[in-house]
Image (cartoon, coloured by chain):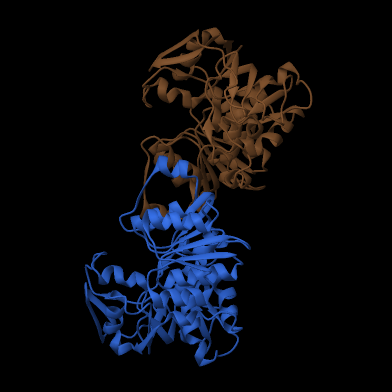
Chain colours: A brown, B blue
Amino acid sequence: MLATVLHAPGDVRYEDVPEPVIQKPTDAIIKLSASCICGSDLWPYRGLNAVSQPLQMGHEYCGVVVAVGEAVKTVKPGQFVVGSFCLSDNTCPHCRHGFQSSCEQVEFMTGAQAPYARVPLADGTLVATDGMPDDDLIPSLLAVSDVLGTGWYAADAARVRPGSSVVVVGDGAVGLMGVLAAKQMGAERIIAMSRHKPRQALALEYGATHIVSERGAEGARVIKDLTGGVGADSVLECVGTQESMSQALESTRPGGSIGYVGVPHGVTFDGQQLFFAQRNMLGGPAPVRRFLPHLMDLVLRREIDPGKVFDLQIPIADVSEGYKAMDERRAIKTLLRV
Amino acid sequence: MLATVLHAPGDVRYEDVPEPVIQKPTDAIIKLSASCICGSDLWPYRGLNAVSQPLQMGHEYCGVVVAVGEAVKTVKPGQFVVGSFCLSDNTCPHCRHGFQSSCEQVEFMTGAQAPYARVPLADGTLVATDGMPDDDLIPSLLAVSDVLGTGWYAADAARVRPGSSVVVVGDGAVGLMGVLAAKQMGAERIIAMSRHKPRQALALEYGATHIVSERGAEGARVIKDLTGGVGADSVLECVGTQESMSQALESTRPGGSIGYVGVPHGVTFDGQQLFFAQRNMLGGPAPVRRFLPHLMDLVLRREIDPGKVFDLQIPIADVSEGYKAMDERRAIKTLLRV
């Protein structure tokens, strides 16, 4: 079959690869209903992560099960499923604590920018719907797999509560999903830091009450003004640079919480600064599996519409253009029709 | 009057200083019932913090009010009071969130290794007892002011709950108070990391269920064994070095929490390591004021006996020997009789 392979920074191709097959009794094979490109795919695409060998790309997925290994019990061929980008057994102690992204058997999904994909640890990773969802819900169900699950985790880690004041640092797809999550969790004030008109518009649509286009010290000052001189209760860090992390720290009140989900690149913290800042901090790859049933339910009941984050939809054969559009920030997030 | 002054590393003197007077309408003057030496006093004593001018030492205190400024409303002369080492107004937004150690007006207490001391922000800092406490309770009430309040905050920040597994890194006075706090909060398994027999004995008395004398990778391995291969729910970091912080990180399960109260000296964190470790972290100077009424009540009802942490009691005139005994780890904590 044809699938997406990254050969070197900037060099992504839709080319022939072997069809996925059951390799372990805990595997499932799914036929994807749609696929997409993640902000984190841009790290190797931009050469910020090393590319030592061709990589089959894609870790966000939903679709129909076509085959399962003999040990798989909870899903069967013909069912529509959504899974997390983190593959987990969902039975180990870390999974039972709700941190499936630190599962003792954790693997990261790959090869999902393709018509078919192998999902290891299917029982612990996939959640099936009761019936076949309407076609128009596919983008939103696909979003649950990573981008919404990650934005949701950022809000959860930042302890957003009814009435909270919230700042979202980063107007990428994850940040926008963080706005949606904060709104769902009952936040009263949701401040989205964004400089881009289309993203500002989507942030407002998802529930942002304020847009702040300033950054750095000036951005922190505006946040202070918007939070009674105090700083926000909860800050969602959705970028992963030293600047964005500093922005998050400066935007939080003492005793407030930062949920950081942008994979840190070149970020260091000074222990004594963190100590006196007195911020709660929790980050990491999102344990999307914990949230999957709830988020799928919200989508199926049409209470949320995370699929709107896909502002570019193209055939998967044009995947190279999809990467380029996101790299150049012409697209927030690209959906690949398979 | 005579009071404790640090002139240079290793050079602490009990010498003549001006008597404290009301300087602001929000001040109180107290006659100390007892004073003591803090582990953090050893940082400048050891030359690890700069000493650019003579410092009047001491920030832990309890005693009887002898004078108040005209704005002071909640305490009056004749009352017995305990205060936090962090002076706070207890009315600003940070105080109302329970983070008095980040009060908008925060100051740090000084000059309490003396017979009399000035307490700024008296209304927001001091809590009075109903009557005069029994003499034998003075060490425990004094402990509330910082060392117990700090150990308590470590357990609170590390989210100790009924049934939690807890590791305490550091067997100094704060660590031992952390053990006491974890026990009070209902922890099921309390693992004290200690190599010193008298401290191990006190840890066991305060509620430790296990003692681990190993450190580093071997220490982390033993902790894993004692927590079903998982790591602890809650870890109290009570030292403040890179080694102790690494020990704390390695001893916590993913999704578990670290409360760090040892002032970090030379500690840095790598953002990506912290991210993938997926630990909750909250540190800072303890907002003792939040816990004062509860902890004083526990002492007055004789439910806890934190005063046992003072294993050396000497007249304040011998304060120099008290510093030396703690510096050489001959004493866990020194009480100064005034």
- Work out whether B263 lies above or below A104: below
Query: Residue A318, image x and y in percent?
Result: 52, 8
User: Where does the C terminus of chain B fall, quadrant-wise?
Assistant: bottom left
Q: Is residue B52 left or right of residue A40?
A: left
Residue in the foreground of this view, choosing between B260 and A243: B260
- Work out whether A131 lies above or below B278: above
Query: Residue B98, image x and y in percent?
Result: 55, 62
User: Where does the N terminus of chain B fall, quadrant-wise?
Assistant: bottom left
The answer to whether residue A94 of the structure is visible from this angle is: yes
The answer to whether residue B26 of the structure is visible from this angle is: no
Query: Residue B133, image x and y in percent?
Result: 55, 89
Query: Residue B135, image x and y in percent?
Result: 50, 92
- Work out whether B134 lies above or below A218: below
Quadrant housing residue A267: top left
Quadrant housing residue A48: top left
Residue at the spot 67% in from the left edge and 42% down from the top edge: A185
Residue at the spot 55% in from the left edge and 17% down from the top edge: A113
Residue at the spot 30% in from the left edge and 80% down from the top edge: B325
Q: Is residue A38 left or right of residue B109?
A: right
Give the total number of marks visible in the rendering: 0
- Work out whether A178 lies above or below B94: above
Q: Is residue B262 left or right of residue A286?
A: left
Residue at the spot 61% in from the left edge and 61% down from the top edge: B161
